[in-house]
Amino acid sequence: MSSSLPTIRAILYDLDGTLADSFLPIRESFNHMLKAFGHRRVLTPEESLELVGGGLEESVARLLSPDEVSRGTAVFRAHYESIYLDTTHPMPGAENLLREISRRGLAQGVVTNKLGTSARALIRHFGWNHLLPLCLGEHDGFSLKPSPDMILAAAETMGLAPRDILFVGDSPFDREAARRAGCPAVLLTTGTHREKELAALDPLAVLGSLSELGDFLRESGRVR
């Protein structure tokens, strides 16, 4: 695991599992979809976690037959859209961290495999739109992570080189997207993977919470 943090001028975050605890509506929507297709299987929280990160259609394809994926994705989305604003909550420490980084004068944004319109609606629901004015997601015209496309587009919008942006996520998809974009990355264990798995990906650090991320940034002395 790398210990040196380059000077950074902006932070990009993943959303689900990083800034937002969205696992309850995701699990409920997968189970609703399975029931709609006549399956008796009920996903456990752990099984639901394993499906998160690579994009919705990829996750649905792991549960339904190929000819059911398109309709299954639509069923999932319809149910999810009806419940997610009321059942998704900020991760502990998220708002304090975002406000602190904003006070330091760094740009911030979100790069997520979640549907872009849903991600932006959630950010507005949390009252974070002034803290996270940039949010790119699925169907915004870019390939999903682990492609670096959204990170590179965000960097261009911010007017920064990728090396000046820290990417914060919780999965191998996040680490690979950051690596391919040329961004340093910090990974959190608040999402879908454990510390040992994330450490093997050689990020700058693996941390247990957003509060720890705040401490890490303060102690590094490389945020300006």
Image (cartoon, rainbow, N blue to C red):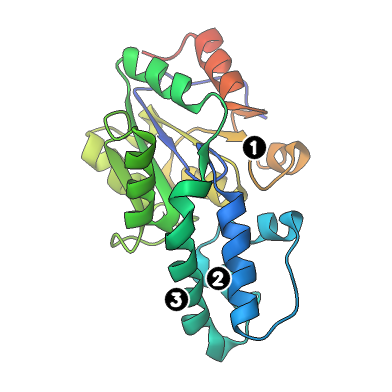
The residue positioned 60% from the left and 47% from the top of the image is: 171
| Separation (CA) of disc 1 from disc 3 | 28 Å
Q: What residue type is labelled 2?
A: Glu
Mark 3 or 2, nearer chain start: 2
| Separation (CA) of disc 2 from disc 1 | 22 Å
Q: Which of marks 2 and 1 is in front?
A: 1
Secondary element at image label 1: loop
Q: Which residue lies furthest to the bottom in this view?
A: 67
Secondary element at image label 3: helix
Q: Quadrant of the N terminus?
A: top right
Query: Is 18 in front, or is 163?
Result: 18
Query: Is 175 in front, or is 28?
Result: 28
The residue positioned 34% from the left and 22% from the top of the image is: 9
Secondary element at image label 2: helix
Q: Estimate how packed mark 1 is, as few (under 14), some (14 to 19) or many (20 or more) residues with alpha carbons within 10 Å.
A: many
The residue positioned 43% from the left and 40% from the top of the image is: 182
Answer left or right for 105 relative to 138. Answer: left
- Asked if 83 appears above or below 162 in the picture, the reply is below
Q: What residue type is labelled 3?
A: Ala
Mark 1 or 3, nearer chain start: 3
Q: Mark 3 points at which residue?
A: 74
Q: Estimate how packed mark 2 is, as few (under 14), some (14 to 19) or many (20 or more) residues with alpha carbons within 10 Å.
A: some
Q: In which quarter of the image is the C terminus?
A: top left
> Disc 1, disc 3: CB below 8 Å?
no
**What number is the disc on residue 190?**
1
Mark 2 or 1, nearer chain start: 2
Answer left or right for 47 relative to 35. Answer: right
x then y, percent, for residue 181 = 42, 45
x then y, percent, for residue 26 = 57, 58
| Separation (CA) of disc 3 from disc 2 | 13 Å
Query: Is 172 in front, or is 25?
Result: 25
Q: Name the residue under label 2.
A: 58
